[in-house]
Image: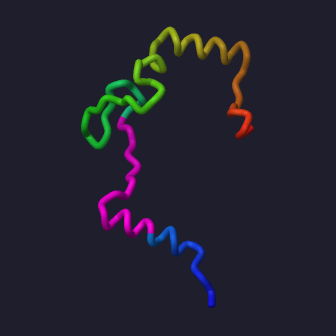
Amino acid sequence: MKRDPEAFLKEEMNDLRKNDLEWIIRYLEQGSKPHSVVDGKEVLMLNTNNYLGLATHPKIVQAAIDATKKYGAGAGAVPVIA
């Protein structure tokens, strides 16, 4: 008898849907800023690394451009992943 290797996952997903617990990916309607718009609603983004707004600060953006021009850029990761 063949077993469906995905049966457990399908059952779990169905249970999540039944209990209205399914995780839905939401997309930003603009760049990541402390105050962003998600699903047409303004929200305070405390779950990002940009909750202080530093990623869009003009001086920091320029410093990143200058450093990239000087040193280059590449993919990086923690040693466990790399």
Q: Residue at x 31, y 67 (%)?
A: 18
Question: Where 57 falls versus 47 (above or below)?
Answer: above
Residue 8 picture location, percent across and down? 51, 71
Q: Relative to 40, is 62 on the left or the right?
A: right
Query: From which residue to which does the magenta span run?
Result: 12-29
- Where is residue 57? Give x, y as percent: 45, 14
> In the figure, is residue 77 to the left or right of 63?
right
> What colour scheme does the image use?
rainbow
Residue drawn at (36%, 30%) of the image: 45
Image quarter of the C terminus? top right
In the rendered image, the vertical position of residue 70 relative to residue 27, given as above or below: above
Extreme residue in the top direction: 59
Quarter-wise, where is residue 31 in the image? top left
Q: Residue furthest left?
A: 41
Location of residue 47 in the rendering, given as x and y in whole percent from the top left corner: 41, 33
47 in magenta: no
Q: How many labels does the image show?
A: 0
The foreground one among 45 and 56 is: 45
Q: Is residue 28 left or right of residue 67?
A: left
Q: Magenta: predominant secondary structure element?
A: loop
Left or right position of 41 against 4: left
Name the quadrant of the N terminus. bottom right
Q: x and y percent of residue 55 in the render?
A: 48, 20
Q: In this view, does 73 lie above or below 27?
A: above
- Quadrant of res 43: top left
Q: Find out whether residue 28 is within the magenta segment.
A: yes
Look at 47% across and 12% down and name the residue there: 58
Q: In which quarter of the image is residue 65?
A: top right
1 in relation to 8, above or below: below
